[in-house]
Every structure is written in C-alpha cells, then in structure tokens.
Image (cartoon, helix red, strand yellow):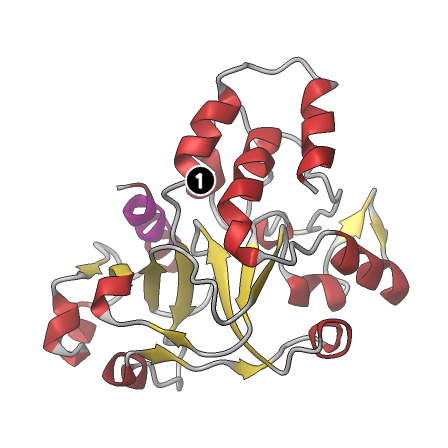
Amino acid sequence: MIDELRSRWDSASRDATTLTRASDLASRLPLVHRTGQPGQSWKSIFQDARLKGKTSGTRWEREALGVEKTTYFFWGCGTYPKGTVAMLLDGVLPDPRCTATPFDTGGCEAGFFVRDGRTLTEAENWSTLDRFTLDDGARVSEYGAHYIADLFDDPLDYVRLAQYSRPQRPPVHELASPTDDRRAWTIEVRVHGDVPVPPERLRKVVLRRRNQLRELPPRYRRLAVVSSSESEDDFGREIAEQVLS
C-alpha cells in the first residue's frame, strides 16, 4: 500500500518537504472517538476506563476479517459527525489487533461512495475494502504520512478541513462522497475488541456542553476542554484545534 503511494509521488512534481512535514504530523496524531449522541450514555466509559467494542458494523468485517466486536476511531480527526464527547487517544496499542482503512468502512459497504461519479456494486465495494485495508493498524502513522502527503501540499489540511470538504487531490482509492463528506477519505482505525482508556492514555476529552464537565469523574477533568460553542460545526473545529495543539 505504501509502495503504491510512493509510485504516485514519484510520478508527480511535488514539494520535496511535503513528506517530511506529513511524517512529523503523522507521528503525533491521536485516535479520535466520538460518543454521546442523544439517548446514548457515555459516563460509563469513564467510570470503567474502557471503550467497549460493539458488534462489527459491516458484514465485510464479520465475514472477510472474522471480526465480531469492534471499537471505531478516526485517525487524527473527529470525522464521525455525531456525539457531544470526543476522546483523543495517544497512539495505537498492538493488542488487541487493529486494522485501518483510508475511508469509512460502513459508508463503503453501504454504497455511500462513488468512483468516477458511478455507484459501485457490492462486489466492487468489497474488493475496495480488501485492497485498501492495512492489516497492521498499529502502523497507521507510517502509512498515514505517505497518504497525507499524497493528498495535500499542506499536511495540516488533513486535520483542519471541515466535515464536508474534498482533499486537494483525489485519494489513491478514488472514492468520493456525493455530499463531499470527508469520511470518504479520512483514515478509519478499527480495534478488534475493547480499548482501555485510563487518563494516562488520553490526550484530551473534548466536551460540547459545559454541564458535561460535572459528569466526568474527577481524574478525567484535568484533560477536559469545553467547546466555546455548542454548534456541530464549531465542535468539529474545536476537536481539530485540540488535535493540532
């Protein structure tokens, strides 16, 4: 997968410093998990210091990967657009196993993405998932550095672009969203099981509402940042600012 990105790089005229800057960014990007949708309890995560994996969201994961329980993250961005709590985790642990894909797997299997303006068949979606899955998700930053450099001249755009936006150049998998949803090109990391989240593993906890601060156990409050606005767009920008801070 990295060789394919290098080949694209070599065939184009690019700023030689882009990969260096992308590698520096990739080395410090956290995993981002969003939760706290209406009617969804999030306090037990902090009480138990654990994100509990849910039934894998796609048939492809269950049948092709043999994964029954998954915890989902986006790498370096709060790209999942729902939820009032965002957790920024430092690094990827080698256990349990994790995989990564440079787009949202659920959106791909559901047929939400197009290629050259054409909706893909189920077989084409599965083939895309098979081809572009990084089997060792713990190497996401190594792959991600090349991936970001391939998409942008300014690597920071990978983090700071809005939910509905396009990368500077088409991604290697050539998928696109008809609504320009960035889930078509942001890297998803899937941990195949539960994820411990003690305070020392978290970089930040970003809250959309100030009253949520009182609901955090005291040992997590020092990590909390409350968004200056409760709007969805502003919350996404706040997450991006914390990722880059």
Tell me if I can see residue 125 in this picture. yes
Residue 240: within the magenta?
Answer: yes
Q: Name the residue under label 1.
A: 26
In the rendered structure, the answer to whether residue 150 lies left or right of residue 212 reads right
Q: How many marks?
A: 1
Going by the numbered disc 1, the residue's amino acid type is: Ala
x and y percentages locating residue 156 in the rendered image: 42, 33
x and y percentages locating residue 128 in the rendered image: 79, 55
The main secondary structure of the magenta stretch is helix
| Quadrant in which residue 218 is drawn | bottom left
Identify which residue is drawn at 43% across, 26% down: 21
| Quadrant in which residue 134 is drawn | bottom right
Residue 124: within the magenta?
Answer: no
Nearer the observer, 8 or 234: 8
- Whether 127 is drawn above or below 139: the answer is below
Tell me if I can see residue 80 in this picture. no
For the C terminus, which image quadrant? top left
Furthest toward the front, the residue is 94
- Whether 214 is drawn above or below 145: the answer is below
Identify which residue is drawn at 35% across, 48% down: 237
x and y percentages locating residue 39 in the rendered image: 39, 86
- Whether 117 is drawn above or below 89: the answer is above
Identify which residue is drawn at 87% across, 58% down: 124
x and y percentages locating residue 131 in the rendered image: 78, 53
For the N terminus, which image quadrant? top right
**Magenta stretch in the rendered image:** 236-243
Nearer the observer, 68 or 32: 68
> Which class describes the residues within 10 Å of circle 1: few (<14), some (14-19), or many (20+)?
many
Which element is circle 1 on? helix
Identify which residue is drawn at 26% across, 79% down: 46
